Image (cartoon, helix red, strand yellow):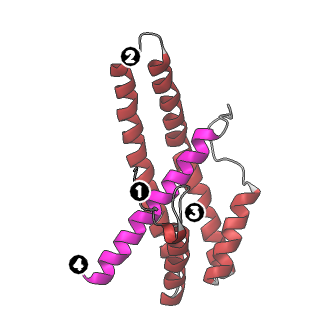
Amino acid sequence: MGIFDKKFSFWLVAFLLILNLGSLGALWFGKTDSRPPGPPPMHPKHDKVTEFLSKELGLDEEQKAELSELRREFRSSTRLVIENQNRNKRLMFEALTQVDADTATAEIYANDIGIQQTKLEKAMLNHYLAIRGICSSKEQEEKLGKVFHRAIRPGPGPRHGPGGKRPPPSRKQ
């Protein structure tokens, strides 16, 4: 494996991890609804993402249609996985917040959340590769890589200082 392959693999995994954490955060704090299974309706936010990628990559009309279909398929295929994760998280914390906390049951739910997470990670990897597959030129692939790189770029966290570095620990006198 060449150095480019290693760098690409690292950034792809990092991007998918950050994307996954963002998705989990949105799902964790979002509301659950009782819509019947099936492809979710197109949300204006998704149109914006498709428009952004189309503009950044310079996609033609056929590629735009393929991208829209890929995104619709991805949402449809991951919906049940995400719903299972949310249900298991709720049940896990319910088991832990009872007076006689059932840690064995909570661990079973935690293990299932991990299994669902693996399925989601694989789906995200395949989705990225499918998007890369509709690129018709090396330039589009490079631009896609740059877009993903910007999306996963580390930034300062809540306890970090300039450049994302933690301040030195304070010494007690």
Residue at image coords 52%, 89%: 139
Q: Secondary structure at mark 1?
A: loop
Front of the two marks 3 and 2 = 2
Instruction: Give above or below for 101 relative to 91.
Output: above
Q: CA distance from mark 1 to mark 3?
A: 47 Å
Label pair 2/1, CB-CB below 8 angstroms: no
The residue tagged 4 is 1
Front of the two marks 4 and 1 = 1
In the picture, which quadrant includes the N terminus? bottom left
Query: Residue 43: horizontal and vertical position, in percent?
Result: 73, 54
- Closer to the chain start, of discs 4 and 1, is 4
Front of the two marks 2 and 1 = 1
Q: CA distance from mark 4 to mark 1?
A: 40 Å
Type of the residue with mark 3: Leu
The residue tagged 1 is 169
Q: Which residues are magenta?
A: 1-29
Type of the residue with mark 1: Pro
The residue tagged 2 is 102
Q: Which label belongs to residue 70?
A: 3
- The total number of labels drawn is 4
Query: Residue 125: horizontal and vertical position, in percent?
Result: 43, 61
Residue 24, magenta (yes or no): yes
Q: Secondary structure at mark 3?
A: helix
Query: Residue 127: horizontal and vertical position, in percent?
Result: 49, 62
